[in-house]
Image (spheres, rainbow, N blue to C red):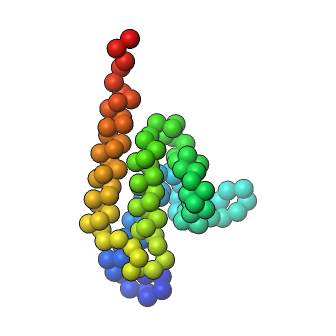
Amino acid sequence: YYSTNRVTKKSDVYSFGVVLLELITGRPPMFAASGERFHIIGWVTPIIARREIHSIADPKLNGQYNVNSMWKVADVALSCTSETADARPRMIDVVNQLKKALEEETCYQQRTDTPSSE
C-alpha cells in the first residue's frame, strides 16, 4: 500500500504480519525504547537474525511457550512483512502455517499442564 497507494490482498497480508508481531512481542507497531522510536519490524528483524527469539517474546508469557511454535509464528510474520509484495505468502498459506504452530503449541501446553505422576 505504501508504494502503490492501493489496498491489495498482499497489503492485507503485510498488515496481518504486523499484527502477528504485535501478538508475539506484546508491543505496538510503533514504540519508543531507550530514547529511540522503533517500528516493530525494524526492531524484531535484527533480533531474529541473531536467533534470539526469547528477546522478542512478550514478557507476559513468562517463558511459557514452545520455542518452535514461537519461531514459526515469527517466521510467518516476517514473511508477511516482506518489502516486496510478490515475496509475501498468500493468506491461505499463512493460515496453514499458523495452524501448524498452534498444533505444536497446544501439544506443548498439554504436556506442561499435565501433573507428573510422582
Q: Is residue 44 above or below residue 103?
A: below
Q: Residue furthest right?
A: 35
The image quarter in which residue 7 lies: bottom left
Residue at position x 40%, y 61% in the image: 76
Q: Which quadrant, please, contains the C terminus?
A: top left
Q: Residue furthest bottom?
A: 4
Residue at position x 51%, y 52% in the image: 25
Q: Which quadrant, please, contains the N terminus?
A: bottom left
Q: Position of residue 38 (x, y in %)?
A: 62, 64
78 lies left or right of 42: left
> Is residue 43 visible in this depiction of the protein?
no
Residue at position x 72%, y 56% in the image: 34
Q: Position of residue 66 (x, y in %)?
A: 43, 41
Q: Position of residue 117 (x, y in %)?
A: 34, 14
Q: Is residue 16 above or below residue 109?
A: below
Q: Residue furthest top?
A: 118
In depth, the one of 112 and 3 nearer the eye is 112
Q: Position of residue 30 (x, y in %)?
A: 57, 64
Q: Is residue 33 above or below residue 60?
A: below
The image quarter in which residue 36 lies: bottom right
Q: Is residue 2 above or below residue 70?
A: below
> Is residue 35 visible in this depiction of the protein?
yes
Residue at position x 46%, y 70% in the image: 81
